[in-house]
Image: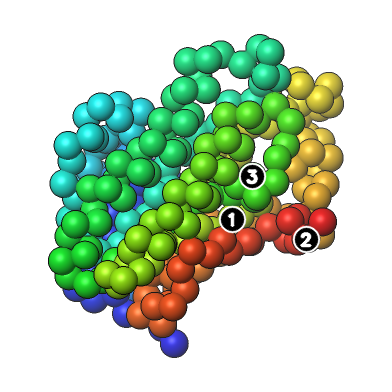
Amino acid sequence: MVSDLSGRRAVITGGASGIGEACARAFAAAGAHVVIADLNGEAAERVAGSLGGEAWQVDLGDTAALAGLSLEADILVNNAGLQHVSPIEDFDPARFSLLLRVMLEAPFLLIRAALPGMYERGFGRIVNVSSVHGLRASAYKSAYVAAKHGLEGLSKVTALEGGPHGVTSNCINPAYVRTPLVEKQIADQARLHGIPESEVVEKIMLTESAIKRLVEPDEVASLALWIAGADAGMVTGASYTMDGAWSAR
């Protein structure tokens, strides 16, 4: 069944590129009014303008500014993220804190801001774009792995609290997705592992996956679209892998 999101308001963080943009386009095609939340205001305006939606330039690292937020959303997609690859002993503490703010504290604050309205309407869909690294660990990614593991727990607590009010909360756990975030990692991975950049995808990123290719943003968006729709009312507190069997090991 094709999801019908007519009349729904979807707020998508990191919505100006990658997985977020793919979700925005899929949701808009299904009838939703999309709000493109992104640090890059110009890019958010571009995507929103092409979809008849609206742009929200927001710095999710500035969590103090989000503490008193009230957010009107039927669907919230917590997608914004960033990566930093470094051994723990060399990991910049400020960078570690930034990753946790953007990928764990900000989702908490956005969920907190959206839940009252969702409870009032008796409907809500929270889609947390986690990662296979929310279920498994990799070396040199302490902040990212910690943030995604925390997001998994936050999502489950939200599911338990939101269930009686018609609100669901789920995680999507892809392996490496063909996005700017992944492309930016290639040089760092090559340096840390002492291999050419041309070998990073095959020798580092795809070693654990039984299917030897990157995930496409549209594939993640298709799952997010289903989770956000009416057919997924009993789907909550779950973590949906899209990792080519990485986590089957």
The residue carrying pointer 3 sits among few (fewer than 14), some (14 to 19) or many (20 or more) residues within 10 Å by Cα, namely many
Q: Position of residue 186 (x, y in %)?
A: 68, 32
- The local secondary structure at tag 1 comes to strand
Asked if residue 130 can be seen in this view, the reply is yes
List the residue tagged with mark 1: 173
List the residue tagged with mark 3: 133
- Amino acid type at circle 1 is Asn
> Mark 2 or mark 3, which has the lower sequence index?
3
Q: Which mark is residue 96?
A: none
Residue 210: name its quadrant: bottom right
Q: Are marks 3 and 1 in contact (CB under 8 Å)?
A: no
Residue sitting nearer the eye, 200 or 91: 91
- The local secondary structure at tag 3 comes to helix
| Residue pictured at 39% horizontal, 56% vertical | 158
Q: Residue furthest bottom?
A: 1
The residue carrying pointer 2 sits among few (fewer than 14), some (14 to 19) or many (20 or more) residues within 10 Å by Cα, namely few
Could you tell whether 213 is left or right of 146 in the image? right
Asked if residue 16 can be seen in this view, the reply is no
Residue 118: name its quadrant: bottom left
Q: Which mark is residue 248?
A: 2
Mark 2–mark 3 Cα distance, whole angstroms, equals 13 Å
Could you tell whether 26 is left or right of 150 in the image? left
| Residue pictured at 35% horizontal, 43% vertical | 108
Mark 2–mark 1 Cα distance, whole angstroms, equals 13 Å
Q: Position of residue 92 (x, y in %)?
A: 56, 13
- Amino acid type at circle 2 is Ala
